[in-house]
């Protein structure tokens, strides 16, 4: 059986060689379709890889976000709840202490508001953030100190500001002189004890102990809790423990909180790209379908041209199965040859496309070639060969040897 298949493929290669240019013209549809498919899959894989890199750079896969749901759905309309529960500093400390795996955690609430410079009563718009410790790793202190856990518990009226707000406070003086300046927020007099790096901030920012936030502010802008697991593998277990603690210790239902992990974001991105990949694949698949029809056309012409040859072979004892294998192997060989040419053309086109994307978007974008892409191409080649080669092969196998020889 194996020997017959090998002989069939050898005969197919010989027939392709004798009709080389005719075969090339007939498989142009496959070549173009496969090239477009390779380019599309490589582009989407590259886009997905870039998106995942951006997510992991801006957020940590170890993070678990605990966020109150302030809205409920009424007749498919989002309506703000009258009553809802949220985490404050004390409840967050209890939650963090209940975790059985080592993890860091902090609480913060952010809003845009006005503060008043004590020295000259100037009003300044700024981003006010109430925080617990530790500070986010992206916050780099340039001058002074950060408030401590003791400051949080005793509600000491201190603040850390960024460079932009420091310059707004002191004008042309050195920004370091903003240390010990005083500002007023919601009637609370705050003393500046530290200055953080801007990191491209376009507005002034002020950070203060979250315990200083009035209840009215916490109610309007409930704090978000963030738990940082030591290892990514521990995130699912910590998430489950957080859910259990909220269910047991908070008045609200678990549905009143959203517990979000960045793995979910990566998963959502992957699902979006999978949908995009399937839709684009179906569109590009039309070209591959046209290429398959071209292969069938080549084989039907081949059957017509080789009718006498088929009749002689059958008269000499060749079985239907032998003729069927001969034309099926020829179909698979032709489609595989076209797919390989399309693969090469697709790879070359993507290599030429990347510099254009970089020049137009100024984004460090790269193609991503995966084994999945190559496996898909080989499967497509086999399917085209079998699907579009079956009818010509069956037509050749059914020829009557006597009638076939008479056509000479």
Image: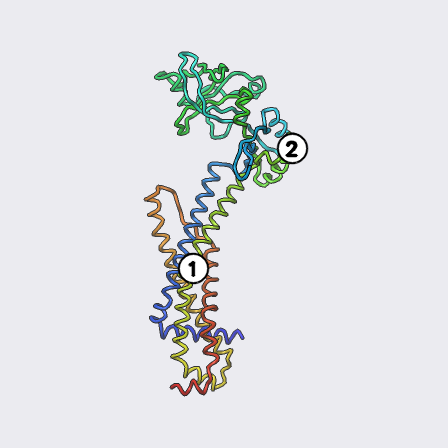
Q: Which residue is mark 2?
A: 245
Q: Residue 334: where, in percent of width, then height?
A: 41, 69
Q: Nearer the viewer, residue 102 or 185?
A: 185
Residue drawn at (41%, 68%) of the image: 293
Q: Examine the rendered structure and indicate whether residue 24 appears above or below residue 270.
A: below
Q: Residue 258: where, in percent of width, then height?
A: 57, 36
Task: Please state, as top left, top right, bottom left or bottom right, where the N terminus lies in the image.
Answer: bottom right
Q: Residue 230: where, in percent of width, then height?
A: 57, 35
**Which dot marks residue 285?**
1
Quadrant of res 32: bottom left
Q: Could you tell which of marks 2 and 1 lies nearer the N-terminus?
A: 2
Q: Nearer the viewer, residue 54 or 307?
A: 307
Q: Examine the rendered structure and indicate whether residue 70 appears above or below residue 182.
A: below
Question: Left or right: where does residue 244 sit relative to residue 170?
Answer: right
Q: Examine the rendered structure and indicate whether residue 147 appears above or below residue 283.
A: above
Question: Left or right: where does residue 82 sit relative to residue 200?
Answer: right
**Which dot marks residue 184?**
none
Helix, strand or loop for disc 1: helix
* Residue 99 seen anywhere in this rendered image of the structure: no
Q: Nearer the viewer, residue 65 or 140?
A: 65
Label 2 packing within 10 angstroms: few (<14), some (14-19), many (20+): some
* Residue 388 seen anywhere in this rendered image of the structure: yes
Residue most extreme to the top: 119
Quadrant of res 156: top right
Helix, strand or loop for disc 2: helix
């Amino acid at each position: 059986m194996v020997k017959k298949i090998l002989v069939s493929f050898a005969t197919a290669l010989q027939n392709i060689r004798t009709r080389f240019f005719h075969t090339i013209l007939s498989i142009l549809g496959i070549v173009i379709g496969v090239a477009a498919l390779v380019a599309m899959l490589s582009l989407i894989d590259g886009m997905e890889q870039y998106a995942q890199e951006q997510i992991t750079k801006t957020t940590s896969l170890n993070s678990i976000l605990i966020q109150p749901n302030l809205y409920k759905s009424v007749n498919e309309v989002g309506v703000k709840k009258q009553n809802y529960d949220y985490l404050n500093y004390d409840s967050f400390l209890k939650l963090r202490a209940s975790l059985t795996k080592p993890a860091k955690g902090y609480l913060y609430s952010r809003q845009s508001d006005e503060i008043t410079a004590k020295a000259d009563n100037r009003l300044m718009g700024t981003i006010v953030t109430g925080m617990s410790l530790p500070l986010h790793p992206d916050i780099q202190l340039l001058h002074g100190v950060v408030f401590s856990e003791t400051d949080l518990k005793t509600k000491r009226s201190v603040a850390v500001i960024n460079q932009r707000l420091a310059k707004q406070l002191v004008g042309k003086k050195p920004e370091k002189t903003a240390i010990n300046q005083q500002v007023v927020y919601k009637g609370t007099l705050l003393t500046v004890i530290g200055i953080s790096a801007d990191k491209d901030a376009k507005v002034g920012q002020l950070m203060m102990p979250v315990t200083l936030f009035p209840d009215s502010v916490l109610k309007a802008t409930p704090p978000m809790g963030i738990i940082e697991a030591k290892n990514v593998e521990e995130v699912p277990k910590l998430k489950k423990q957080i859910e259990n603690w909220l269910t047991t210790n908070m008045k609200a239902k678990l549905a009143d909180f959203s517990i979000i992990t960045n793995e979910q974001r990566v998963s959502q991105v992957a699902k979006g790209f999978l949908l995009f990949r399937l839709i684009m694949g179906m569109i590009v698949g039309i070209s591959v379908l046209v290429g398959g029809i071209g292969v069938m056309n080549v084989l039907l012409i081949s059957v017509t041209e080789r009718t006498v040859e088929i009749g002689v072979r059958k008269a000499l004892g060749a079985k239907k199965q032998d003729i069927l294998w001969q034309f099926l192997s020829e179909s698979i060989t032709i489609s595989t040859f076209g797919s390989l040419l399309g693969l090469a053309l697709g790879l070359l086109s993507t290599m030429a496309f990347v510099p254009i994307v970089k020049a137009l978007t100024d984004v460090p974008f790269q193609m991503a070639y995966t084994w999945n892409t190559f496996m898909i191409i080989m499967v497509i080649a086999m399917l085209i060969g079998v699907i579009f080669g079956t009818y010509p092969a069956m037509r050749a196998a059914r020829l009557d040897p006597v009638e076939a020889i008479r056509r000479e």
